[in-house]
Amino acid sequence: MRIVIAGGHGKIALRLERLLAARNDTPVGLIRNPDHAADLEAAGAEPVVIDLENTTVTQLTEKVMGADAVVFAAGAGPGSGAERKATVDRDAARLLADAASLAGVRRYIMVSAIGVDDGPPPGSEPVWAAYVEAKRAADDDLRERSLEMDWTILRPGRLTDDPGTGEVWLAPKVERGDVTRDDVAAVIVALLDEPATIGRVLELVGGTTPVAEAVRAVGA
């Protein structure tokens, strides 16, 4: 498969690219900074330079043309303000969906965050609240596209850089907890292979079920 990944230099994306390349898929990483291209090439991915905050849907459509699926793994990241939570975590996700639709690419995996439907708790730090609202808006937008997109929304818990265990808890609702980025990437690969997960919103934390088995179970 040819998989286009927004946020191609992110920690989850680089792991995902390595996994896809190892099984002879073609990962394509969308990056803003051309200096990151070598890291993607080392991971086995094709780097494509495009700034999702400063591009048109036509330009982005050209980048996703011919893909079998797109994955939104971009994020404004730590240290960014509320404005960039909106322009990246919300608006760029919508733009990718628009571009995929125009390019005829139906499969869309959204990397979201656990519990965003609940909204930010009262008294939340403003930037965190903006992040939660941005992710919720992006998810809501994708859920409204069921006629044009075969979407799956994946909502990991608190991300860690610990080595992956290969075992997770994946379900529409789970207790909050940690999950390794290695395991998130492995779950994304398994979701791409399991069409029965289309139209599902799934929360993910570390657990005791092997990844492939966990994904098959939620698709059953």
Image (cartoon, rainbow, N blue to C red):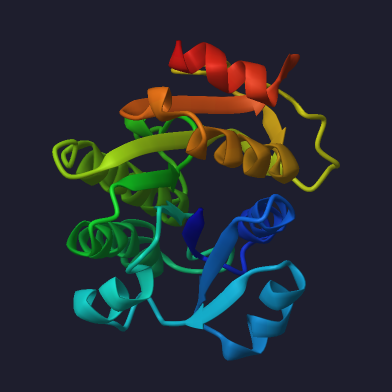
How far across and down, in percent of the image, does residue 21 sit?
A: 68, 58
Residue closer to the observer: 77 or 161: 161
Instruction: State the residue at coordinates (45%, 17%).
Output: 219
Judged left or right of residue 96, residue 20 is right
Residue closer to the observer: 167 or 133: 167
> Looking at the image, which residue sits at the far bottom?
35
Residue closer to the observer: 135 or 172: 172
Name the quarter where the C terminus is drawn.
top left
Residue 74 visible in image: no
How far across and down, in percent of the image, does residue 211 sit?
A: 68, 25
Instruction: State the residue at coordinates (39%, 61%).
Output: 67
Query: To which quarter of the image does residue 190 belong?
Result: top right
Query: To which quarter of the image does residue 95 belong?
Result: bottom left
How far across and down, in percent of the image, does residue 38 sit?
A: 71, 83
Instruction: State the residue at coordinates (44%, 57%).
Output: 127
> Looking at the image, which residue sits at the far right?
163
Judged left or right of residue 93, residue 170 is right
How far across and down, in percent of the image, does residue 120 sit?
A: 39, 37
Judged left or right of residue 115, residue 151 is left
In the image, is residue 28 above or below residue 161? Answer: below
